[in-house]
């Protein structure tokens, strides 16, 4: 099976989805799964069978480093 952006997340055989320990207890979070070939799939936990976005290891590393550096802090919404 070809794994590409927009694939139904439940169609990714063997995917072990996980979320951050800091995730919202109400289930509103992002889940990630490592893929064969070293890619990473990302899905919305509220829609587990919905589409998954597929990223390369370099793309995920850049995102994580940007989050650590505060590059996205201006997008946070205060409740």
Image (cartoon, grey):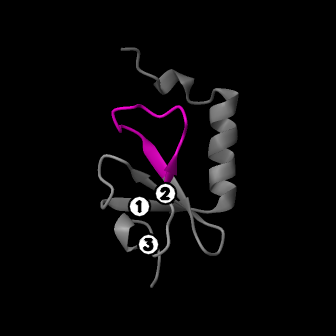
Give the CA distance from mark 1 to mark 3.
9 Å
- Which residue in the structure is indicated by mark 2? 17
Q: Position of residue 68 (x, y in %)?
A: 68, 32
The reply, left or right, for residue 73 in relation to residue 79 is: right
- Residue 26 painted magenta: yes
Single out the mark in the foreground, 1 or 2.
2
In this rendering, is residue 68 above or below 76?
below
- Which residue in the structure is indicated by mark 3? 12
Q: Residue furthest bottom?
A: 1
Magenta part of the protein: which range? 17-31
In this rendering, is residue 65 above or below 32?
above
Q: Is residue 8 visible?
A: no
Q: Which secondary structure lies at badge 2?
A: loop
* Overall secondary structure of the magenta section: loop
- For label 3, the crowd category at 10 Å Cα-Cα, with few meaning under 14, some 14 to 19 and many 20 or more, is some
Q: Is residue 30 visible?
A: yes
Q: Earlier in the sequence, mark 2 or mark 3?
A: 3
In this rendering, is residue 59 above or below 19?
below
Q: Position of residue 67 (x, y in %)?
A: 62, 34
């Amino acid at each position: 099976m070809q794994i590409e952006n927009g694939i139904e997340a439940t169609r990714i055989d063997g995917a072990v989805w996980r979320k951050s320990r800091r995730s919202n207890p109400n289930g509103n979070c992002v889940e990630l799964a490592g893929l064969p070939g070293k890619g990473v799939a990302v899905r919305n936990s509220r829609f587990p069978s919905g589409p998954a976005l597929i990223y390369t290891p370099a793309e995920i590393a850049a995102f994580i480093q940007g989050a650590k550096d505060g590059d996205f802090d201006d997008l946070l919404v205060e409740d």
